[in-house]
Image: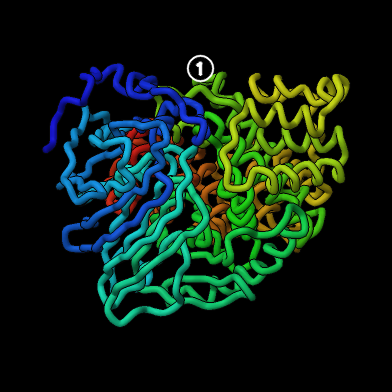
Amino acid sequence: MKSKIFLGICFASILLNACNNKQVEQSDDMDKLSNDPHSYANMNEVRTTHMSLDLAVNFDTKTLKGSVEHTLENSGGAEELILDSRDLNIEKVVLDNGQEAEFNLGEEDGTFGQPLSIKISPETKKVKIFYETSPGAEALQWLSPEQTLGKTHPFLFSQSQAILARTWIPCQDGPGVKFTYDAKIQAPVELMALMSAENGTEKTSDGVYTFTMDQPISSYLMALAVGDLKFQSTGRNSGVYAEPAILEDAVWEFESMQSMIDSAEALYGEYAWGRYDVLVLPPSFPFGGMENPRLTFATPTIISGDRSLVALIAHELAHSWSGNLVTNETWNDFWLNEGFTVYFEQRIMEKIYGKDYEEMQTKLGMGELKKTIARLKEEGKPEDTHLYLELEGRNPDDGLTDVAYEKGRFFLQTVESVVGRAEFDKFLKDYFTNNKFQQMNTEKFIALLKEKLLTTPELQEAVRIEDWIYGPGIPDNVPPTESSELERVGNAVAAYNAGEVKAADIDTAGYTTHHWLYFLRGLENLDSVKMADLDETFKFTGIGNAEIACDWYQHCIEQDYTYAFPAMSDFLIRVGRRKFLTPLYTRLAKTEEHKAWAKEVYAKARPGYHAVSYNTIDEILK
């Protein structure tokens, strides 16, 4: 019963807005959500409160096939349910009385997919959709055995953020809609299935796995992984899942996980999700981590061998409060997730590793933020340097920049500097407690801030809320970023830039990843002689630490240091994390010679990248 004509005949060019603006009278029983410019769903008319998934995993066809049943809150008496879908084969829809329902698929948009319109009655409680995903579903990455560490079994993982859940589940794909779920997944018997829910720690004999998520979550936090996995505990309610060959290294690297949970609870209240486990994915995972409730997905690039990159685990753990517990209502409010989380991450790391560690991260963060703001201004996008974004008609991934993360964090640090840490901590603890499992938008947060913390005109003027949230760049009342550890590095790199010392003369004893990044980012006046000197002394080319490698290879591109290009090719093929790929391909694209080389490498690398990464690189190299 598919149709290319959406009910109401919304034309392609105005479809998304037309569908979003279609509202019926709001019921008093259902909280009204802000208009979501990235969802077709009529979430203010009828809303999903629970989903039941029953899916079979087929690695041969690269598809998931089965059903999803939506339990509805329809206190407004809606006669139509509109869900988000993209590249899904909808076979049939059944209502709770067993009757097949009429449904239509609307005009297709390359970014937003299609609205799935289902005819219901005001009495309808459940809607069950039988469907199959497309082999090209952008949320799902199907890896061949050769693309895994073990080289024996295939691997599947999902990445639903920001609006990719609709490519594997027909749903109300907006962060403002929260629901509980249960699932049954049929996987190959030799593999283990995991979800963002309660998970077992052993493979089943028949490949059938059942899951329950009793706390309400948003669609972007729906997650599935299937692979040759084992589990090891790291504490009373924490542990690591990984391919067997990397499990021991991961457990050693993440030995502080339980301390992180304890430190976070001491700051902002009880951890609400039961367990906190981490799944280490193959290198093609496009992000550093994804905060799927109860099961963070993490890149193996943070396994550095010296525990210097575990702040990423603290970041994803912090999302258990900021994001998962109190969630941005739309993607325009994304900074409410990430700004809070970076601030919270820094507080956790300071508590465990001390003030010097926190100061290094903060100073590096300010440097990255300044670079991002300069780039956005250069690209003619000064509005994208605001905290609150206007992303209507755009892919919300456009908002996934350091602005949401770092400018958001520095805004909160500014608030802390004005009111004092003790008062700010009390406010944040109350904020998470009073708004748990709820949505939050920017306007509501500002009102809370003024009512509960910045209660006088003088305090509000000192913080300059509107300048930070609705204005460009970095306001000049930001607290200074100082680090004695990085000052030592800065003095060394200044001497090297001036030609006063050789690389071998620099005392690098005790350098961690943060020291090296500050060193590499401070290098100037490089030439082929200095590049060779640095490389011979510090062995940067081919280094296993991906953070250091990325910064080093950027210099190699700028200086045409061809000795490093074979190792850089291996890096680009092996690592799928967008954070590293984007700056390297961007620099390579600046000259025709380097761009041609990049395209040759990319032809080999692209099949191993997730859609989140290759969509970005396609645009860079077009």
Residue 24 seen anywhere in this rendered image of the structure: yes
Q: Identify the residue at horizontal 88%, vertical 39% (top origin).
A: 420
Is residue 551 or residue 93 the one in the foreground? Answer: 93
Q: In this view, does 319 lie to the left or right of 57?
A: right
Q: Identify the residue at horizontal 64%, vertical 57% (top origin).
A: 314
x and y percentages locating residue 415 in the rendered image: 79, 33
State the quadrant of the N terminus.
Answer: top left
How many numbered dots are placed on residues in this image? 1
Check the image and name the residue furthest to the front. Answer: 123
Residue 407 placement: quadrant? top right
Is residue 105 or residue 151 the one in the foreground? Answer: 105
Q: Residues within 10 Å of mark 1 (few under 14, many from 20)?
A: few
x and y percentages locating residue 466 in the rendered image: 70, 20
Residue 393 placement: quadrant? top left
Residue 250 placement: quadrant? bottom right
Q: Is residue 92 left or right of residue 50?
A: left
Q: In this view, does 416 lie to the left or right of 383?
A: right
Check the image and name the residue furthest to the left. Answer: 1
Colour option used:
rainbow
Residue at disc 1, secondary structure: loop
- 242 in relation to 537, above or below: below
As shown in the figure, which amino acid type bears the numbered disc 1?
Answer: Gly
Look at mark 1 in the image and give the residue it sits on: 380
Q: Identify the residue at horizontal 23%, vertical 46% (top origin).
A: 95
